[in-house]
Image: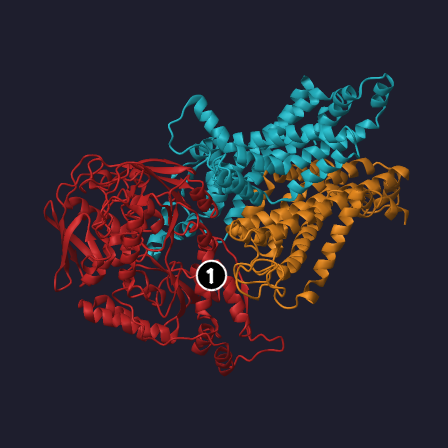
Amino acid sequence: MTRALILLRRRLVGSIFVLLIVIIGTFLLLEAAPGDAVDAYIVSTGGDAGMIELLRHRWGLDQSELTRLANYLWALLHLDLGHSVTFSRPIREIILERLPTTLILMGSATALSFGLGSALGIYAGAKPGSFRDRFLSIGSLALYAVPGFWLGLVLIVIFAVDLRWLPIGGIESLASDKTGLARAADIATHLVLPVSALGFIYLALYLRMMRAGMAEAWRQDFVLAARSRGLSRRRIVLAHVARNALLPLVTMLGLQSAQMLGGSVVIESVFAVPGLGRLAQEAVAGRDTPLLLGIILTSAVLVIVINLLVDVAYAFLDPRVGASEAGA
Amino acid sequence: MSGFTISRRTMLAGSAALLASTAMPVIGWAQTPKKGGRLVVAADSEPRNLNPAIVASNGVFFISSKVVETLAEASFDGKDGLQPRLALSWEGAADGLSVTFKLRDGVIWHDGKPFTSADVAFSALQIWKPLQNLGRTVFKDLAAIDTPDDLTAVFKFAKPTPFQLIRNALPALSSVVPKHVYETGKIEENPANNAPVGTGPFKFAEYKAGQYYRLAKNTDYWGKDEPWLDEIVYQVLPDRTSAAAALEAEEIQLAAFSAVPLADLDRISKVPGLKVITKGYEGLTYQLVVEINHRRKELADVKVRQAIAHAIDKDFVVKTVFLGYAATATGPVPKNDPQFYTADVPTYAFDVTKANALLDEAGYKKGPDGNRFSLKLLPAPYFNETKQFGDYLRQALAAVGIDAELVNNDSPAHIKAVYTDHAFDLAVGPPVFRGDPAISTTILVQSGIPDGVPFSNQGGYKNEELDALIAKASETLDTAARTELYKEFQKKVAADLPLINVAEWSFISVARDTVGNIANNPRWAVSNWADTYLES
Amino acid sequence: MSVLRRFLRTPEAIAGAIILAALFAMALSASLLFPGDPQAIAGPALLPPFQDWSLPLGTDRLGRDVLAELFHGSRTSLAVGLAAATAALVIGAIVGTLAGFAGGLVDEVLMRITDAFQTVPGFLLALAFVSVVGPSLGVVVMAIALGAWTGPARVARAEVLSIRERDYVAGARVIGMHPLEIAFREVLPNALPPVLALSSVIVAAAILTEAALSFLGLGDPNRVTWGGMIAEGRTVLRTAPFLSIIPGVALVLTVLGVYLAGEGVVETTAVRRSLS
């Protein structure tokens, strides 16, 4: 228990530095961009020199970069994420509105790729080198190699347009006044396609990792011992081989959480899902620096928390892991 | 194109016959619409500021024009191409110093307050003139507005202002917002900018970011029996391929502004239950233009510019990039403009030999690698077609020995590169023709515009003759004389080529057969949709 | 020779090797078979495949030869993949070696920076970076490398940590070699194999990231890439599906080939190392 606490404290202190690097890095990157929020705004409106000057002043873009960074950090100390000029709303509000959608999408997709991936990995790894092993690992690789947006579009054409089993996009039916269970079911039907598209891409990772881990475990002493004790093959596979192969997958879960958010940018755009990924793309396109900072900060905190949970879980699952190793 | 009114009528009569049930007598294109229903429309972007009095742009109008009305709307057959909305009549004084509007009686705002001339005066003086992207130019000399009674507004100008210009500006620039909502606090920060209040047939109901905008029927609308629809919902579909899928899946009923890619139209027109409509955008013509940086010494030579014009196969562009849904351009005013267009200008036929000869003449011989010189080409990223034309132009230039390197920027970077930093040699832009050259067209060639003004002459072009012509036209009050000056303007631009007009296009709508009264005015997609209906 | 034989023992590795060989052949022969600009307009637009034998795979929206684009695209796609992987591995190896070898504050700082990069979604970083600098092939490569170097850095560091206490490193210290020289001449080469094992994953991911960036309109318009072809073909997915399916199949095969061959190499070297 104390070990877990030490780990937690170390992690939290480290995280603050990490977040600071992330904020300053993102800020500098966006400041280096050609064109600012006003340039992005006038794309659709046009306007004369006076109007442009007026906008720059109103949005505080005529201040120096250092002043704005200092202002941002100062506000952040007070847990204020600032104000988005493109949405003309507080950023905290915008992000909180989108966060649940992204969490549901990413959570479901992770559950799908982790659950199905490890299950199929166990199935494949139970008989290393067999036809089903080869078929599954190559098949999942082929899915991994399909660009996500293309997979999404093909799914839409098949399941939404031709078969009409599922809606083409969005997170729920438009202005439908559904509540409670009906609404949950509605959201679930809308999520089937985007979750599949996102989940299937990452399926290969877990499947192949599970399979590799199992191939390794088969060679280990305790499996040989279990075999000599005459345990059934099914029992050996599930209780010994798979269980040992599962640990690295849990680590992978933490590492993948950031990548999945990146992948969801494209998927959210294809399926018109109003999540953080698409918001991030809009923030970049609109040169809305504070909004992008808010999103990256949120995702960074999310990733840090997930990894923390993974580490703590790991420390409990596997007594061999000490705080020092996990802290690296 | 001059016969578009007739062909439009034929088209509408045809679709009317198709739409109306067999038992119904069809007289002209009058139909008996059905009341009620929800129209779901695709929206590919989400404008944040929905106040059309501040942001006069098609993206905003697409949604807000149903909520906030203008003084007048464009019309196929009304006098001067206009039909009354909030104003019933408009009269310009002979000295060009005043315009009198008589306003509609019995109009009330969505919040129940009566609409009066004070609202018009407030909108014009406090918003259009100081804050609106287009109004800042057109209404720059507006000095005061007299309101002798609740239904009369007299615009007073400090300098003579052509009545023709004011008239032509009405459909896009004259959105009237309620004074009582905007008079307290800063106009730019008013919450009504995100949830507009107007007099239109629909009330703004809700906006769910990333999902939809919803407009609900205004039961107190001044139009008799209007609006027909109960609701309009704009579903946000950011990917350009999803609108077609959504139409086919019957999740939406209308995709305007070419939300369905042109290359998909042929297929989609054969899908039962869907119709492709090419009308209803005559007042919203976009122009495909090659912007030129005259600071480059090669491009400062008119022979080189003419050579580039000869190198472009405009018919190929119309046929391949626009799949026929466009017209070739001759000059800075589009062919479908009923007031100003003249075909009597120098033209540049597609002729590679001539282009090569002109370039040789200008002194830019082909080097050993077949290249004469290299250029940076920046296609605007806003439309698929501008990007595709960029790809084509690179090939067309290669054919005459000009090596063009494409630079692909996103929108803000493109705006900055072209209009502020002038970091381009050639750019492909889609300026909009807004019914009068003085609104947003002459600015494309006029000199003396400060850096950073988008969609203006930032190519360093300076032609005193043209500048004088533009200045003269801006203060010529007589309509015929003013029109004549703009014809002269077209000739001079086509001869000297400060920029090269390649094609003119407007948009395509795709709708389900059940949607009625589509495209019945030249700015239909951005008009108020009071008479649009859904068949059951 | 025996290494090669061992490599060729698994059918997956053979398949991978064949695919890669075909790919390199395509890339090398592109300008021989299709001289001139692959983006030149060669025929009528949207010609379906197998209609005209001078344009066997048909033409795209502007009438460009799909087969020529496919061949030239193999070059850029491979170049993007290899360059991004090389850049990521080089950055990762250097950062990892420095951190692992120096230890202390240097290690702490470098690892927090690595953490920071790992916390930000790689694709989001690439998206922002390309929007900021402007999409050209080099920038796309850099953007992908920025999001991919952290994995190699961690692996390199872990390896270096285990190597730096070995005898030959101590020996090098005794004879007075500069620490940096020890780090990069003695330690890094020995830490490299497991780092290189990541390369196939990075190459595959790089090719896919380039495709996704093209989808969002951030590709280099002067070069043909398969990702760009798929992204452009998607608008006519229903009318002319071949435009996105043909480069799509090529992309899938390539990523599979890279992966399978990479795994073959890892297995071969793993066996060799366990033997030695």
Question: Residue C117: image x %, image y %?
Answer: 62, 40
Q: Is residue B489 left or right of residue B361?
A: left
Query: Which residue is more in the foreground, B348 or B405?
Result: B348
The residue under label 1 is B321
Q: Quadrant of residue A183?
A: top left
Task: Give the colour in which the image draws chain A.
Answer: cyan
Q: Quadrant of the C terminus of chain B?
A: top left
Q: Residue at x 48, y 34 (%)?
A: A76
Is residue A266 visible in this depiction of the protein?
A: no
Question: Three-letter amino acid code at disc 1?
Answer: Val
Question: Residue C78: image x %, image y %?
Answer: 68, 54
Q: Quadrant of residue C59?
A: bottom right
Q: Quadrant of residue A17?
A: top right
Query: Which residue is more in the foreground, A70 or B316?
Result: B316
SS at badge 1: helix
Q: Is residue B276 left or right of residue B406?
A: left
Is residue B165 visible in this depiction of the protein?
A: yes
Question: Residue B396: image x %, image y %?
Answer: 51, 69
Q: Is residue C73 left or right of residue C218?
A: right
Task: Give the colour in which the image draws chain C.
Answer: orange
Number of other residues with Cα within 10 Å of mark 1, as a class: few under 14, some 14 to 19, many 20 or more? many
Task: Give the colour in which the image draws chain B.
Answer: red
Q: Specify the farthest residue to the front.
A: B23
Q: How many marks?
A: 1
Q: Is residue A260 above or below residue C74?
A: above
